[in-house]
Image: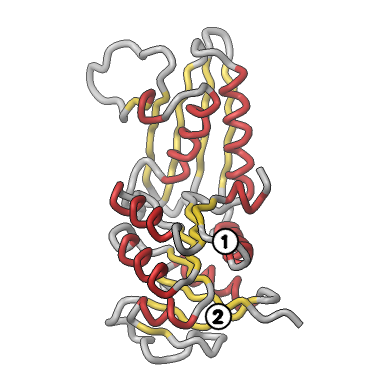
C-alpha cells in the first residue's frame, strides 16, 4: 500500500485555507498533518476540525512535518516560506498572487533544490481558458485589440488579479511577445488612441464575487469573448490539492498547472 502524502497548509483559517483543508481531509492518499495561521488565532494549539493536525503559529513547523506545503497566504511572506521549503527539503504549492520580483527570485532559488508549483489560479477551466486565449491570439492579427476584464470580491487586495495577468501572458505569448512589452495600464483621463498590439486590463471589485474573467478580442467588425466564472471556491481548492499530490512525486524545479494537466 502506497504511503500517504503528508500535506501542510499555510493560512489555514482563511477562506481558501479552510476549503483546501476540507479537500485534503476528504481525499484518498493524502493526510493533513499540520496547519498554520496567525499567532493570535483562538484555535492555535488545538487540532484542526475534522483532523488530528495541529493548528500552529510557526510556518517552519508545517514544513518540518509535511511532504508538500500549500501556501495561500497574502503577499509578503512568500520569500520567507520559499526559504523554509528549501531548508526543510519539502515541496511547495503557492497560490499567492501579486508576487514581487523578490518573491519570484526566492521561488526560483528554492526550485533549485525542491519542487515548486506556483499559479495565479488552480482552476481546470481557467487553465484551459489560457490555452484557448493563446491559440486565439496566435491566429488573430494585431488589428484585433485585446482587453482583459476581471471582477473579484471587495476584500481582494491586488489588481489586476493573478489570473488576469496569466491570461495576459497567454495572449502575449500567442503573439510572440512578452506581456511587459505590450501591456497597457488601467485607463483614466486623456489616454490618447490605443496603440496597435497592446493588451489592456480593467479590474472591478465588489460584493462577494469569487472570480470572473473575460478576454475580449475586438476587431473593426466583430468581437470574440472568452470567459470563465467561478461558482465556488471549492474548484480552486480541488485544483491546489491535485497539484500538491502531483508535486509530491516530482524532481526539483518550477512547475505550473500546465504541467499537472499536460497542456
Q: What's the distance in space between the residues labelled 2 and 1, CA to CA? A: 22 Å
Question: Measured along the vertical axis of the image, is residue 36 above or below residue 160?
Answer: below
Q: Residue 208 appears at what percent x and percent y? A: 44, 54
Residue that appears at 34% across and 86% down:
42
Task: Please name whichever residue, 181 or 199, is drawn nearer the observer in this view of the structure.
Answer: 181
Number of residues whose C-alpha sits closer than 10 Å to that of mark 2, classed few (under 14), some (14–19) or many (20 or more):
many
**Image position of 144 (left or right of 186):** right
Number of callouts in the render? 2
From this viewpoint, is residue 234 visible?
no
Question: Measured along the vertical axis of the image, is residue 80 above or below residue 102?
Answer: below
Residue, far left: 189
From this viewpoint, is residue 37 visible?
yes
Question: Measured along the vertical axis of the image, is residue 171 above or below residue 41?
Answer: above
Residue that appears at 50% across and 86% down:
53
Question: Measured along the vertical axis of the image, is residue 58 above or below residue 177?
Answer: below
Q: Quadrant of the C terminus?
A: top right
Mark closest to the chain's N terminus, 2 or 1: 2
Q: Residue 29 appears at what percent x and percent y? A: 68, 76
Q: Nearer the viewer, mark 2 or mark 1?
A: 1
Number of residues whose C-alpha sits closer than 10 Å to that of mark 1, classed few (under 14), some (14–19) or many (20 or more):
some
Task: Please name whichever residue, 249 or 42, is drawn nearer the observer in this view of the structure.
Answer: 249
Task: Please name whichever residue, 15 or 131, is drawn nearer the observer in this view of the structure.
Answer: 131
Badge 2 vs badge 1, beta-carbon distance below 8 Å = no
The mark found on residue 32 in the picture is 2
Residue that appears at 37% across and 40% down:
160
Q: Which residue is mark 1?
A: 251
Amino acid at each position: 500500500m502506497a504511503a500517504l502524502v503528508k500535506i501542510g497548509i499555510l493560512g489555514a483559517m482563511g477562506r481558501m485555507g479552510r476549503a483546501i483543508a476540507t479537500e485534503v481531509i476528504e481525499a484518498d492518499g493524502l493526510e493533513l498533518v499540520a496547519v498554520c495561521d496567525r499567532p493570535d488565532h483562538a484555535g492555535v494549539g488545538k487540532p484542526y476540525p475534522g483532523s488530528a493536525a495541529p493548528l500552529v503559529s510557526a510556518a517552519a513547523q508545517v514544513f518540518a512535518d509535511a511532504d508538500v506545503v500549500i501556501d495561500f497566504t497574502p503577499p509578503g511572506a512568500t520569500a520567507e516560506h520559499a526559504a523554509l521549503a528549501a531548508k526543510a527539503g519539502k515541496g511547495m504549492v503557492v497560490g499567492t498572487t501579486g508576487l514581487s520580483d523578490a518573491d519570484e527570485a526566492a521561488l526560483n532559488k528554492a526550485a533549485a533544490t525542491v519542487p515548486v508549483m506556483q499559479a495565479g489560479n488552480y482552476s481546470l477551466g481557467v487553465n484551459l481558458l489560457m490555452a484557448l486565449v493563446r491559440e486565439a491570439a496566435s491566429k488573430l492579427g494585431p488589428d484585433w485589440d485585446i482587453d482583459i476584464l476581471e471582477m473579484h470580491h471587495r476584500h481582494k487586495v491586488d489588481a489586476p488579479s493573478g489570473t488576469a495577468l496569466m491570461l495576459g501572458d497567454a495572449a502575449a505569448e500567442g503573439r510572440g511577445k512578452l506581456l511587459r512589452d505590450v501591456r497597457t495600464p488601467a485607463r483614466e483621463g486623456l489616454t490618447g488612441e490605443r496603440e496597435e498590439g497592446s493588451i489592456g486590463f480593467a479590474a472591478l471589485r465588489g460584493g462577494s464575487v469569487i472570480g470572473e474573467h473575460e478576454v475580449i478580442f475586438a476587431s473593426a467588425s466583430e468581437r470574440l469573448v472568452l470567459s470563465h466564472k467561478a461558482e465556488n471556491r471549492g474548484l480552486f481548492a480541488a485544483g491546489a490539492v491535485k497539484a500538491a499530490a502531483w508535486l509530491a512525486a516530482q524532481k526539483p524545479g518550477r512547475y505550473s498547472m500546465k504541467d499537472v494537466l499536460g497542456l
